[in-house]
Image: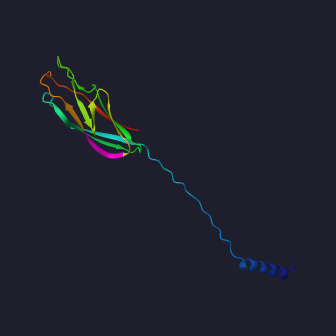
Amino acid sequence: MSRLAASALAASTLALLAAAPALAQSASGTIQLNGSVAVACTVAVTDNNVALNLAGGESARAVGRIVETCNKGNGYTITVASANAGTLTSAAAGATPISYTVGYDGASGGLSTALQVNRDSAQFGRQRDLTVTVPASAQYIAGSYADTVTVSIAAR
């Protein structure tokens, strides 16, 4: 093939390529975003440092403030328990335990077994008072009486 023929062939090929529509190239990609939130339940208890009037009795006396936070969508349980099965005890000679009841957000009762309050959804910063009721009696033996109440939270 002569140089002239090769040049003519190259020119006609270039002309055909230039006349043909350019094919557009496209590409795409994806990024999958993932994350998670851990279950977090906390209970903050503020002791009001109340000295109960045992002889005169107490009726729904606020003894503490509870702040509940739990991000579990189907809820959580608050448990109120007593170290002395719902009684105030004393080391004084002849003293007998004094029974009391607690109230928390509409639930109430003695603490011979733990009191439980169920929440059906997540709550953030829910505040409620813990109250105590003690029957009055002039026959309690002199002395100091005490119990420890524990409030806990657990996701359901």
Q: Residue at x 78, y 80 (%)?
A: 12
Q: Is residue 133 left or right of residue 79?
A: left
Q: Is residue 120 visible?
A: yes
Q: Residue at x 20, y 20 (%)?
A: 96
Dividing the picture into quadrants, the one containing residue 38 is top left
Q: Is residue 69 left or right of residue 49?
A: right
Q: Residue at x 34, y 44 (%)?
A: 69
Q: Position of residue 26 (x, y in %)?
A: 63, 66
Dividing the picture into quadrants, the one containing residue 139 is top left
Q: In front: 19, or 119?
A: 119
Q: Is residue 50 visible?
A: no
In which quadrant will I find the N terminus?
bottom right
Q: Position of residue 71 (x, y in %)?
A: 39, 45
In which quadrant will I find the C terminus?
top left
How is colour applied across the structure in the image? rainbow
Q: Within the magenta stretch, is there residue 128?
A: yes
Taken as a whole, is the magenta stretch helix, strand or loop?
Answer: strand
| Relative height, residue 10 to residue 123 (above, below) | below
